[in-house]
Image (cartoon, helix red, strand yellow):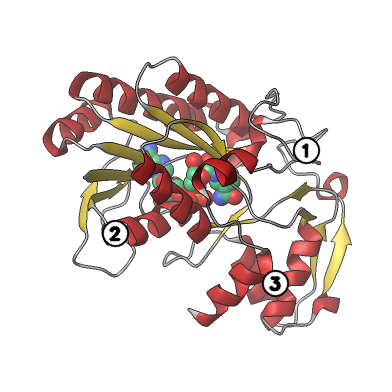
C-alpha cells in the first residue's frame, strides 16, 4: 500500500512518517525543502497543498491508496489576524487533495480538532454539535465539510492538545515548559482550559489501525487524562524532575490572547476504542516514554 503524507515535518506528520514508513510505501511531503527528521531512507517531496496543480501532479504520479493529511495552518491566534492564510491552507488545501483523489482515486484520512466545539460542555463525542468560537476552529469545521460532501472514502480524526518529541524546534508546550523550568524561570499557565492531552505517537498508532482496518467515518482520539493546562504543566515538571513551584496559575482572561478558547473542551473516544481497540495513553505514560527517548 502507498501512503502520501502531507505536513510530514509537523508534530503529527513526523510521528506518522516514522511509524508508517516501516509498514507501507510512504511518500512524505511538506512545504519545506527537506524532511526535518534525519532519515535518508524516506522518500520526500516538496508539496504545498495550496498549489492545486502540484497536488494533482503528485497524486497522479504516486497513485496513493491513502492521503494522510497532517498539513495545516495550526497557529490559533495567528488565524485571527491572517484569516485568508488559515482558510487557504485548512480549507482550500483540503479541497485540492479531495479534487485530486476524485480524479485519480484513493482514500483520505484528515485530522481535525476539538476546537470545532464551543467548550461549554466537553469532553465531546462524535455526535455532539460543533460550534467553533475562533477562526481556526471555523476553518477546521469547514475542512470536515469538504470531506463529508466529497463521496470519497474519507476518515476524519479529531484530536486535541497534541504533544510528542519532534526533530524541528517548532512551538511545543512540553518543550516550552521544560526549557523555562530548566532555567529556573517562573511561568504562568491557564487553569481554566480543559482537555485531554494526546500523545502524538498514540494517535499515529490509531491512524495505523484505521488504515489496516479500512474503516471510515468520524472518530475522536485523545489522551486518558481530562485536565487543565496548569495541571498538564505540573505533570511535565513531575516527570522531568523540574520544580513545579515555578509554575503559577493564570486565567484565559488575564492572558488576553487574540483567539477565543473553548474552556471545557476535549474529546471522548469510546467509538474508536470500541471499534479499533486502540491504546489510550495517560500523560504520565507518554511523558515517561518521551523522556526515555530524548
Ligand atoms: N497540535 C495540536 O495541539 C492539535 C490539536 C488538535 C488538532 N490538531 C490537528 O492535527 C493536525 C496536525 O497538527 P500538528 O500539531 O502536527 O501541526 P504542525 O506541527 O503545525 O504541522 C503542520 C505541518 O504542515 C505544514 N504546512 C503548513 N502549511 C502547509 C501547506 N500549505 N502545505 C503543506 N504543508 C504545510 C507546516 O509547516 P510550518 O510549520 O512551516 O507551517 C507543518 O510542518 C492538524 O490538522 C491540526 O489542525 C492539532
Q: What x and y, as percent, mark residue 284?
A: 67, 70
Instruction: Give residue 103's quadrant in the image.
Output: top left
Give the distance between the C-alpha atoms of the residues marked 1 and 2, in whole angstroms: 36 Å
Q: Judge left or right: residue 164 versus residue 287.
A: left
**Residue plotted at (63% across, 51% down):** 161
Give the distance between the C-alpha atoms of the residues marked 2 and 3, in whole angstroms: 28 Å
Q: Judge left or right: residue 290 versus residue 122.
A: left
Judging depth in this view, the residue of 186 and 15 nearest the camera is 15
Query: Which mark, by number, is residue 236?
Result: 3
Q: What x and y, as percent, mark residue 181?
A: 72, 78
Q: Earlier in the sequence, mark 3 or mark 1?
A: 1
Discs 3/1, front: 1
The quadrant of the rendering that contains the N terminus is: top left
| Figure check: 86 above or below 213 | above
Judging depth in this view, the residue of 39 and 205 nearest the camera is 205
Q: What x and y, as percent, mark residue 219?
A: 55, 36
Q: Element under label 2?
A: loop
Mark 3 lies within 8 Å of ligand 1 (Cβ measured)? no
| Figure check: 174 above or below 155 | below
| Marks 3 & 1, CB-CB < 8 Å contact | no
Query: Which mark, by number, is residue 122?
Result: 1
**Residue plotted at (53% across, 22% down):** 142
Instruction: Give residue 129's quadrant in the image.
Output: top right
| Figure check: 149 above or below 163 | above
Q: What x and y, as percent, mark residue 265?
A: 75, 41
Query: Which mark, by number, is residue 35?
Result: 2
| Marks 1 & 2, CB-CB < 8 Å contact | no
Name, please, the residue furthest toward the left. 61
Amino acid at each position: 500500500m502507498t501512503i502520501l503524507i502531507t505536513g510530514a515535518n509537523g508534530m503529527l506528520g513526523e510521528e506518522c512518517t516514522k511509524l508508517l514508513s516501516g509498514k507501507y510505501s510512504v511518500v512524505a511531503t511538506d512545504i519545506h525543502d527537506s524532511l526535518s527528521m534525519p532519515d535518508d531512507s524516506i522518500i520526500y517531496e516538496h508539496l504545498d497543498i495550496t498549489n492545486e496543480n502540484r497536488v494533482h501532479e503528485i497524486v497522479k504520479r504516486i497513485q496513493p491508496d491513502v492521503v494522510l493529511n497532517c498539513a495545516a495552518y495550526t497557529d490559533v491566534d495567528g488565524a485571527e489576524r491572517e484569516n485568508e492564510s488559515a482558510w487557504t491552507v485548512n480549507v482550500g488545501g483540503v479541497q485540492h487533495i479531495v479534487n485530486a483523489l476524485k480524479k485519480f482515486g484513493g482514500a483520505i484520512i484528515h485530522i481535525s480538532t476539538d476546537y470545532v466545539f464551543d467548550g461549554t460542555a466537553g469532553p465531546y463525542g462524535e455526535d455532539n454539535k460543533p460550534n467553533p468560537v475562533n477562526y481556526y476552529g471555523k476553518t477546521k469545521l469547514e475542512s470536515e465539510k469538504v470531506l463529508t460532501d466529497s463521496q470519497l472514502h474519507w476518515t476524519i480524526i479529531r484530536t486535541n492538545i497534541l504533544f510528542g518529541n519532534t526533530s524541528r524546534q517548532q512551538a511545543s508546550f512540553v518543550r516550552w515548559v521544560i526549557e523555562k523550568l530548566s532555567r529556573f524561570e517562573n511561568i504562568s499557565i491557564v487553569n481554566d482550559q480543559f482537555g485531554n492531552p494526546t500523545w502524538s505517537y498514540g494517535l499515529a498508532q490509531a491512524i495505523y489501525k484505521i488504515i489496516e482496518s479500512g474503516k471510515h467515518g468520524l472518530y475522536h482520539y485523545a489522551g486518558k487524562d481530562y485536565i487543565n493546562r496548569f495541571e498538564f504543566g505540573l505533570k511535565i515538571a513531575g516527570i522531568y524532575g523540574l520544580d513545579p513551584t515555578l509554575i503559577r496559575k493564570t486565567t484565559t482572561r488575564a492572558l488576553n490572547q487574540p483567539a477565543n478558547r473553548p474552556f471545557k473542551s476535549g474529546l471522548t473516544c469510546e467509538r474508536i476504542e470500541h471499534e479499533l481497540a486502540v491504546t489510550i495513553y495517560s500523560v504520565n505514560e507518554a511523558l515517561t516514554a518521551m523522556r526515555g527517548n530524548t
